[in-house]
Amino acid sequence: MKMLWAAPDGAILEDSRRAALGRSGNEVREPRPEELSPLPAGAVLQYLPARTARGLGRRGSVESGKGYAVAAMLPNGWARTLLPAYEAPPGVAPLPFFGYTAVALRGDEMLVAAIQTEENYRWSPFQYGTPDLPDLVARRLAEQPDNRLLTHHAHCALDYGCYNAQNVFYRRWEGAVAVSAACNAKCRGCISLQPEDMPPSPQDRLDFVPTVGEIVEIGVPHLESADAILSFGQGCEGEPLLKADLIAASIREIRKATSRGTIHLNTNASAPKAVARLIDAGLQSIRVSLNTVTSERYAAYYVPQKYAFADVEETVRICRAAGLQIALNLLFFPGLNDLEDELDALEQFIARHRVDQVQMRNLNIDPDLYLASQPPLVGRAVGIPEMVRRLRKVCAVGNATPGIARAIQE
Ligand code: SF4
């Protein structure tokens, strides 16, 4: 398998003298066959600025090539198995917030270091950004011209290509409702807010608090559509639990109007008492975002303000006791989450709380920036395919949120 590299004009070329390499944590190695797949539809290739591609030379040593490293960004439902191998000069500016994935060339076929964790037509890129979307958005905005939240999600749907925001206008499946401008964490890879000395966040954070009326105007018609899930907590906002009373009041108003569909929350799960209030109001499903279940690594990435990982676990415990659908939104990183100790801890967490599903999410961050903030990587990494195999023995592994997953099975 040959290494790929990029010329300054962006052309992607084969290196005939070097074999492809990938990176797991800090280890640079050849990809294993089970770690590779043909480049999936919807993947995007990109070169890494100021990073030189690295490959395996004919004498068996790791060599830097002559051009930029190349990486793939994966569509939903694909889990990265290896990071790209590259050499970065000291002090180089961090990469923008994407999930950089190793690539290789076998004959004429482009390969990517990834495995598919779920094939779900509802998350296929072909279902989104369709030619009729701008008209659907314009028509809905004309129906509810004063709804600021609808205007905000129109921007997410058209300018960011957000699937959940688009679903509000398609009136189907998982639809977005953002509520919180503030957060109680400072995630190093936050996609809605970054400090000035970092690359810009991919999305702008919501800058107002919607009213119950604005939320209900979106929520009721959405839940009345087929297989609908109304999803509080989106990438364009802070932490929704900081607006738990607003969400609880909205759920109660929505449920006066319709009993259909699933009401769901995407959250950092930092406030167990707030989640208990939402369950009382009618919350049915939760997806907890975390990069690990080990508290030191969690704190190093989330930088929690006035809460700790113990609160996250307590929230999960409360949700299990109340019978909610529970998914973990696992922001995983090859060479870290598949370390033996990390994987053992995750399996135990899943078993302890009978977690229904793990959603494997590629952590969108410069790999060097992430590892620099983490405690050292110790022990053997089993590889992402083996990690997924082991997780499937204790829960479902996929990408659709639980309410939808259940609807699909029915
Ligand atoms: S919890 Fe979410 S909104 Fe808050 S800092 Fe982390 S990624 Fe950003």
Image: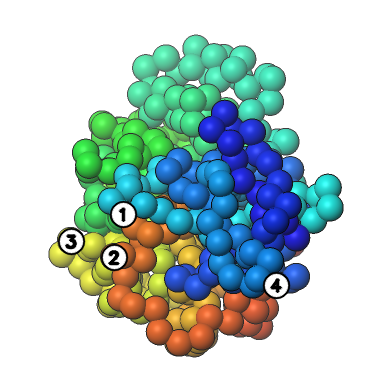
**Disc 4 vs disc 1: which is toward the camera?**
1
Q: Is mark 3 within 8 Å of ligand 1?
A: no
Marks 3 and 2, how far apart at CA:
17 Å
- Local crowd at mark 4 within 10 Å, few (<14), some, or many (≥20)? some
Q: Which quadrant of the figure contains the N terminus?
A: bottom right
Element at label 3: loop
Q: Earlier in the sequence, mark 4 or mark 1?
A: 4
Question: Pointer 1: what residue?
Answer: 90
Q: Residue at x 55, y 61 (%)?
A: 63
**Disc 3 vs disc 4: which is toward the camera?**
4
**In the current view of this chain or complex, which residue is farthest to the left?**
306
Which disc is residue 373 wearing? 2
Question: Pointer 3: what residue?
Answer: 305
Q: Are marks 3 and 1 in contact (CB under 8 Å)?
A: no
**In the current view of this chain or complex, which residue is farthest to the right?**
107
Marks 4 and 1, how far apart at CA:
30 Å
Marks 3 and 1, how far apart at CA:
31 Å
Question: Pointer 4: what residue?
Answer: 32
Query: What amino acid does circle 1 point to?
Result: Pro
Total number of numbered discs in the rendering: 4
Q: Earlier in the sequence, mark 3 or mark 2?
A: 3
Q: Residue at x 51, y 85 (%)?
A: 380
Element at label 4: loop
Q: Which quadrant of the figure contains the C terminus?
A: bottom right
Marks 2 and 1, how far apart at CA:
16 Å
Between 353 and 66, the residue placed more toward the observer is 66
